[in-house]
Amino acid sequence: MRIEEANEAVKTILPEKRYRHTLGVVATAEKLAEQYHANIEQAKLAAMLHDIAKYFSKEELSDIIKRRHDITNDILTFHHSLWHAPVGAAYIEEEYHITDKEVLDAIRYHTTGRQNMTLLDKIVFLADYIEPGREFPGVDEVRDLAEKNLDAAVGKSLQNTVTFLVERHQQVYPDTIYAYNTYIKYLR
Ligand code: DGI
Ligand code: FE
Ligand code: FE
Ligand code: FE
């Protein structure tokens, strides 16, 4: 699938505000891909499609999780805001026949991160966190770090997310803990 087709698809599927967020993620992912010598086409395509399943109903999301053998059912015992990431990867594989495993994985792990993220994983994960439309405490620090050290920026965003979840008595998904343990090292 070409980026123009992906753009048309998400423009149709996503509400206006989420579509604007998506375009921010695409622009940020393109910049990061240039800076860190990743494949720009892969970065833009993964960014464009990363939230495609964000507004699927809980029923639709859980149905897809249950019938896909490549998505662990244990995610259903965690907050439903995590579900759109692996479902988005499954959806674009089924509907658009996207087979690029690196693109699929970058979407699959864009919310939680994982241990030993690929360069593309990190770019989509960070672009989602720091795109220009994001405004929350700590985002500017991660924006600055992203210009100097990609791993440190990933580590800081994970530290912020884990802290945020713990303070609110929320569960932390295991992949998020694995990612935190891998990337927090780069902050020293
Ligand atoms: O889809 P976006 O809003 O653009 O961003 P996202 O895919 O990073 O989703 C962010 C949401 O996911 C936010 O509400 C925090 C939540 N989240 C991220 N990691 C975890 C998590 N929630 C739980 N319960 N556990 C996690 O490990
Ligand atoms: Fe998302
Ligand atoms: Fe995110
Ligand atoms: Fe997003």
Image: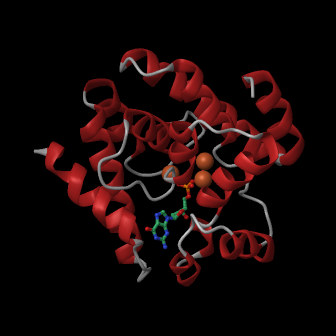
Task: Tell me if residue 91 comes above or below residue 70 in the rendering.
Answer: above
Position in image of residue 159 (x %, y %): 29, 57
Name which residue lies at 53% across and 19% down: 40
At x 81% / y 47%, what residue is drawn? Answer: 95
- The quadrant of the rendering that contains the N terminus is top right
Q: Is residue 14 left or right of residue 77?
A: right
| Left or right of 71 in this view: 170 | left
- Identify the residue at image location x=56%, y=27%: 42
Q: How many dots with numbers?
A: 0
Residue 133 x/y as whole percent: 60, 38
Q: Position of residue 82 (x, y in %)?
A: 57, 66
Q: Position of residue 20 (x, y in %)?
A: 73, 37
- Residue 110 in the image: above or below residue 178: above
Residue at 44% x, 80% y: name it. 170
81 on left or right of 15: left
Above/below status of 60 relative to 104: below
